[in-house]
Amino acid sequence: MKHHSLSKVLKRLACVLAALVIALAVAVFALWHNELATLSSLKKLSDRDEAHRDGAVYQLNVSGGYYFDDFLARGGASTDSELISFITQSITKGIIPMNIKTSTIACSAFTADTQSGDRVFGRNYDFSATNTAIVYTNPGKGRHASYSTIDLSFLGLDKDKDVESLGQKILTLAAPYVPLDGVNDAGVACGIFMSYQGEGKGTPTDTQTDKPDLTSTTLLRLILDYADSVEDAVALAEQYDLHDSASSCFHYMVADSTGRSAVLEWVGADADHDTDGSQRQLNVLWNDTDALSDSSDWQVVTNFIKAPGYYDGTAVEMKGLDRYEHLAAALRQTNGVVADKNAAMDLLASVGRRTWNNDCLLYTSDAADEEDSVDLGGRGIIKKKKKERAGMEKNGIQSITAMYSVERGR
């Protein structure tokens, strides 16, 4: 009799435990189903190449809206610590702390046309070595789908180690908040570039008005998610106070499939009097008013401020001027036309500061049929080829250089 009673008790206990496990599993899924789907999508596209000083490259398909609407609704963030706090509380529910940092980089970018009429936006990162991720987002609810590229070391991941442990993978959930460039399904591409305003890595821009706040990379996320055109991107930027991240300062380039582009710079009076980031104002250099470009057919940016007169009468170094002149001379000679995407890649490689012979990662609208490309495209192309995103696995990525190409007018 006692044995029978004990058996009943054990069965009941087992049922209770099973119910608790199921309830816990349901609660975890309800709370983190998007995050779990995102983590399951992480895959390595290429191994690290120590001989070429390259880290590994990963693909991450982000599920859900990654709380960005909530981030904007609360007024954004005016510091990295505020951004980190929001990400930690929203994505990991306070369980795993996040971190954001940056490195000294020497980026170059240009816009041009191909002979077939596609518009290209190409850029180099010029890190010495790092792990990167190609991040696909499709948040819905009126926001654009996009691809972006991130440096995983920005999330605190060791650039000398692969992303293998669960703890390391969880940190990648913050990837949508730290894009360094990208393109959306409206054909709007954008990138961030160090501008070295002030001493050392520069004095961060820190504008202080009654507008809501954005940090450097969340400005790019805003553009990728909401901008239909370059004009939209500029209008969005004008609605926020900007606070540069990681004790550095930056300027930005935006381009779209119509041929329109602009460089966005927050600047003070001149290079000798630009150490107070709170006093800077947004200056926009459109491709048809950029005095250094000579033509609306192309635009170039590296790591110096392009605002007219900024360096007049100063001894401040114009960072990346040699790379700028090289790109500008090449585009000036062809009236802003490159033969094809391979020629554009060659031009990017020619200003690679690491080796001056970098291999490149190409994003292009017909990439599904290419061996070294990633399918992006303009409006409609991402939707049309969404099932072909597995083509990302076919690339032979050797460095952190990107080319965005969309069909003009899409």
Image (tube, helix red, strand yellow):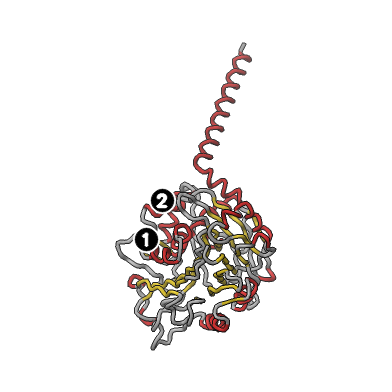
Name the residue that disc number 1 marks.
Answer: 213
Residues packed near mark 2 inside 10 Å, few (<14), some (14 to 19) or many (20 plus): few
Residue 377, located in which quarter of the rendered image?
A: bottom right
Q: Does residue 63 appear left or right of residue 232 in this picture?
A: right
Please state the horizontal and vertical placement of residue 87, each as a whole percent of the image.
46, 53
Label 2: state its secondary structure. Answer: helix
Query: Residue visible at 59% across and 78% down?
Result: 351
Circles 1 and 2, Cβ within 8 Å, touching? The answer is no
Residue 297's place in the image compared with 164, above or below, is below
Pick the front one: 264 or 117:
117
Real-space Cα distance between discs 1 and 2? 13 Å
Residue 199 placement, left or right of 155: left
In the structure shown, which secondary structural element does the residue marked by tag 1 occupy? strand
The answer, for residue 35, to whether it is visible in the render is: yes
Q: Name the amino acid, label 2.
A: Asp
**Residue 127 percent location from the top left of the image:** 57, 71
Residue visible at 40% across and 57% down in the picture? 82
Measuring from the top left, give residue 307's x and y in whole percent: 41, 79
Q: Which one is in front, 127 or 359? A: 359
Query: Does residue 369 lie above or below 340 as drawn?
Result: above
Give the residue pinned by disc 2.
70
Q: Would residue 104 appear left or right of 360 to someone viewing this image? A: left
Q: Residue furthest bottom?
A: 313
Q: Residues within 10 Å of mark 1 (few under 14, many from 20)?
A: many
Residue at image location 58% in from the left, 19% down from the top? 9
